[in-house]
Image (cartoon, helix red, strand yellow):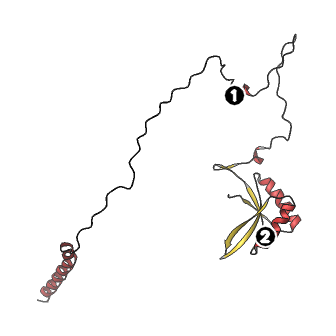
Amino acid sequence: MRERVKQRIVGAVVLVALAVIFVPLLFTLEPPRAVDTASQIPPAPDIDPVPVEDPEREEGFAAPKPAEEAFLPADPVVEGTPAAPVTPAPAPGPAPAPAEARPALAGDLVEAWVIQVASFRDRQVADELVAKLLAAGHRAYVRDAVAQGATTYRVFVGPVALKSRADADKIAIDKAFGVNALVLRFTP
């Protein structure tokens, strides 16, 4: 008999739970809300296609030279002597940099380097150091940064495209100003 009572109690609890769930669904007192289905996107504009004709070479123009010959100097011709092939003279100025010393690309931008000379909590002290660096011929500037909940003013020199030049500038700045600067990648 006890088993029967347990089954009836469990059945009654299940029926009450179902009633609690489904009765509010059947007897809603609020009317259903209308959903605005109107689009806020304007209709596509009517654009007439513009016909573009294929380019045609006009008569009287010679075909362009191949890329290897396009920028070579013209052969000098002296009357009565056959023209000798001309080798281009080396361009005046510094020799090209070795491959490892050339600027590199970082994504779409040229990879650049800056020197973080110092970091101060006082803007006036940072501006004074920038003035000294500018007087010494360096391209110096200040950037604000938040570190440990306080604003700091970081003094930078640069940017330069070659890390070797940044390293050389760092050594010169360390000696001249008695600091221990850092060479970092430049982020615009």
In the image, residue 134 sits, relative to residue 71, either above or below, namely below
In front: mark 1 or mark 2? Answer: 2
| Residue 103 visible within the image | yes
Q: Which mark identifies residue 38?
A: none
Q: Amino acid at mark 2?
A: Ala
* 96 left or right, relative to 105: right
Other-residue count near label 2 (Cα within 10 Å), few / some / many at <14 / 14–19 / ≥20: many
* Quadrant (top left/top right/bottom left/bottom right) for the N terminus: bottom left
Q: Which mark identifies residue 67?
A: 1
Residue for point 67% across, 72% down: 146
| Residue 148 visible within the image | no
Q: Residue furthest left?
A: 1
In the image, residue 17 sits, relative to residue 143, either above or below, namely below
**In the figure, residue 58 lies in which quadrant?**
top right
Which structural element holds mark 2?
helix
Q: Position of residue 4 (x, y in %)?
A: 12, 85
Decide: marks 1, 2 in contact (CB < 8 A)? no
Residue for point 81% across, 20% down: 75
Q: Amino acid at mark 1?
A: Ala
Nearer to me, 107 or 141: 141
Nearer to me, 173 or 47: 47
Which structural element holds mark 1?
helix
Q: What is the spatial separation of the Cα atoms under label 1 and label 2, in whole angstroms?
A: 52 Å
Q: Position of residue 90 (x, y in %)?
A: 84, 33
Q: Which residue is mark 2?
A: 126
Residue for point 67% across, 23% down: 64
The tally of labels here is 2
**In the figure, residue 34 lies in which quadrant?**
bottom left
